[in-house]
Each structure stands twice: as C-alpha cells, then as structure tokens.
Image: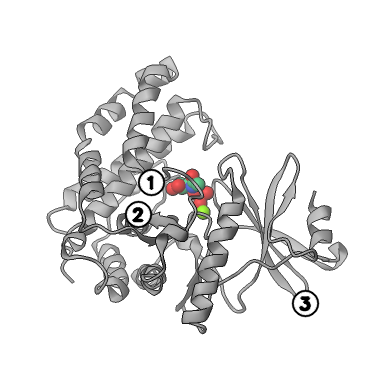
Amino acid sequence: MIEEIYSAYNIDKDKFEITPIGNGLINQTWRVKNGQHDYILQRINTNVFKSPEAIAHNVNVVAKYLQQKYPSYLFTVPVKAVDGRELIFLEGDGYYRLTNYVKNSHTINTVEEAAQAYEAARLFGQFTKLLSDFPVAELQITLSDFHNLTLRYQQFEEALQSGDGARLNESKEMIDFIKANKNIVDTYENILQNPAFKLRVTHHDTKISNVLFDDTGKGLCVIDLDTLMPGYFISDVGDMMRTYLSPVNEEEKDFSKIVVRDEYFKAVWKGYMSEMAGELSEEEKTHCVYAGKFMIYMQAIRFLTDHLKNDIYYGAKYEGHNFVRAGNQVVLLQRLIEKEDTLGCDI
Ligand code: GN1
Ligand code: MG
C-alpha cells in the first residue's frame, strides 16, 4: 500500500525513512523524511470519516481565508500529489494525505507544565479568533453530531437496552452516575437555545499532541483539522480541560492518580481568554468549568457506550479497556465537580 502513496507523491521509497508518530485512536500518522524533505503522512479512518472530501474542502477554504487576511499566520496545508490530488484513496484501505513538516517543531503527548497548557489554549483561541469573521456555514460537516451531547446520551440509553448483558450488570454503578448527572445534558440543550452562545469555527480535537511547539517551548500552530466544523467554545476549552488538567490520561488504570490541577485549569482558561476575551459573551464566559464537565461527561458516555456495545468504535487492547477508560473519565469528572465552586471563570 505504501508504495502507491509514495509514487503518488513522487517519493523515492528507498531514500526516505518512515516512522510512526502520535497516539490517536482513530487516524494513523507517520513522519516521512530524508535529508532534504520532511513530511507528515496521515491515514484517515474512513469507517469514521465517511466523506474525507469534506475535510479537504474545509482545510482549503480556511487556508485561503487565512492566507489572504493573515499571511504570516502559520497554517499547514496538504501537499498536492503529482496529479494534483490532495487525498489519495486506496481501495479497501482508506484515504492518505501529506503535509510538510514544520521545521524545528515538535509535539508532546503529555502536558507537563502549566505553561504548555497556556500556550496550547492561546493557539486554539487564536485560531478561532482569526476566523471570527469567516462564514461558518461554508464549512462542511466532517462528522455529523460529533459533539452533540443529546445524541450521545441517546446512544447510551440505546446501549442500555441492547448492550451486552454481562457488561451491563458490571457497569451498574457507572450507569447510575451518568444518569444522576444528566443535568449536564440539560445545560447543553439550554445552550443550543441561547442566542448568547455562538457557533464559531471550532477545532474539536484540542489534545496537546495537536499543537506544534518550537524548541523554546513556545506554541507555533495547531494541526489536525479533520474535525474543523462549526461548534461551541465549550468543545475546544472542554477537551483541553479533559486532557490537560490531570497528570494522567484516559488510559490510566490507577484512578488515585487522577487529579484536577488548579494551576493548569487557570492556564487553560487564561491562555484561551488571552485571545478570546473580546469574542465570548459574558454568559459564555461563565461556562468555563461547564466546558470541562461537558467534554469529560461526553467522553465517559462514549467509552461506556462502546464497552456496552462490545468495543465496536474504539476497539480494545485488553478485556474491559473501554470500561477502564470510562471509569477514568467518571473519576476525572468527579474531581472537577468537587472543585467546581473554587475554580472561577474570572480572569
Ligand atoms: C478520538 O483519534 P483521536 O484520539 O484524535 C475521538 C475523540 C476522542 C478521543 C479519545 C473522531 O480522537 O473524539 O475524544 O479519541 N475522535 C473521533 O481519546 O471519534
Ligand atoms: Mg484528531
């Protein structure tokens, strides 16, 4: 398969080194380089992204807008294949795309300093801010209902009816916790009706490995625009909270290590607000902690639903993998709720 990709881009296979990078659950990524050329190759999972052309469309319209309005803004665009294609489809495999590797940049997989959280939040905020006049309706939907919490809750309820019997029994405590916190869904539904909440150009995957840093630790740019779509700020801020606040990630089995670090919470919100303070409404600004609850709760639901449905979406590396991930997210949510009254949204 890789031969076809190489020839599409006129890359001499024997002269390039290919190394897998990143830790995404859905797409796969490699670095492809020789002395002169350095690329990032990505395989888009077409079981999940049913129309990769929508991704290409979004990246192109946004790239064009940014190039015209902010020519010095660093934005990675796809490298065209020899015949001009931006995506290479391999029958029975998936879609591939290539981008240039940004010189002297690196990614990190864990947030180890609050300053990294600040930088990432600043960049995701800047991205949305620079696109504040971009007509969001021009973006195509690359994954429908991706952060639609109402639908995620319905899918969870459906799994309660049709899911694996033994797994349902073992998950009782977690199911009860999710049901008991359904007010998080209610708040989301109120947001949808509230004109103070605006649909903006939203990244929807703000994990730390989607930020490029330079050698001094300064953030350079955001990458991975597969889920670039109209959305609410709670998606981007919330997923940063979900993935930056705790020193351990969703894979951690020892739940006693899950903690909400106040300093990182402040760093995320301050970094985001350093760009977005003039864009967000006063009412949106009061929802900074809710943003975290929204995303952590949704992820707990998604992992548990997948466990009940025998791991059809995320897959499992060991028995009960998604049960552990769901339990991890439930604990993270509890830790955040415990601190809810002490974590303020005032900067
Ligand atoms: C998936 O592939 P990755 O790791 O970037 C998922 C996110 C989840 C995340 C949980 C398209 O993202 O929504 O938050 O796993 N992406 C998709 O690790 O479902
Ligand atoms: Mg992604």
Question: Which residue in the protein does label 3 denote?
Answer: 35
Vertical order, 31 against 91 (above or below)? below
The answer for how far apart the CA atoms under marks 3 and 2 are is 39 Å
**Residue 221 horizontal/vertical position (percent):** 49, 73
The crowding category of the residue bearing disc 2, from other C-alpha atoms within 10 Å (few below 14, some 14 to 19, many at least 20), is: many
Q: Is the Cβ of the residue at disc 1 closer than 8 Å to that at disc 2?
A: yes
Q: Work out which quarter of the rendered image holds the C terminus and state it.
A: bottom left
Question: Mark 1 falls on what kind of element?
Answer: loop
The amino acid type of the residue labelled 2 equals Ser
Residue 235 is labelled as: 2
**Residue 165 horizontal/vertical position (percent):** 42, 15
Report whether residue 37 is seen: yes
Question: Which residue in the protein does label 1 denote?
Answer: 147
Vertical order, 291 against 253 (above or below)? below
The amino acid type of the residue labelled 3 equals Gly
The amino acid type of the residue labelled 1 equals His
**Quarter assignment of residue 280:** bottom left
* Residue at the (56%, 42%) spot, across then down: 48
Vertical order, 307 against 87 (above or below)? above
**Residue 153 horizontal/vertical position (percent):** 33, 33
Question: Mark 3 falls on what kind of element?
Answer: loop
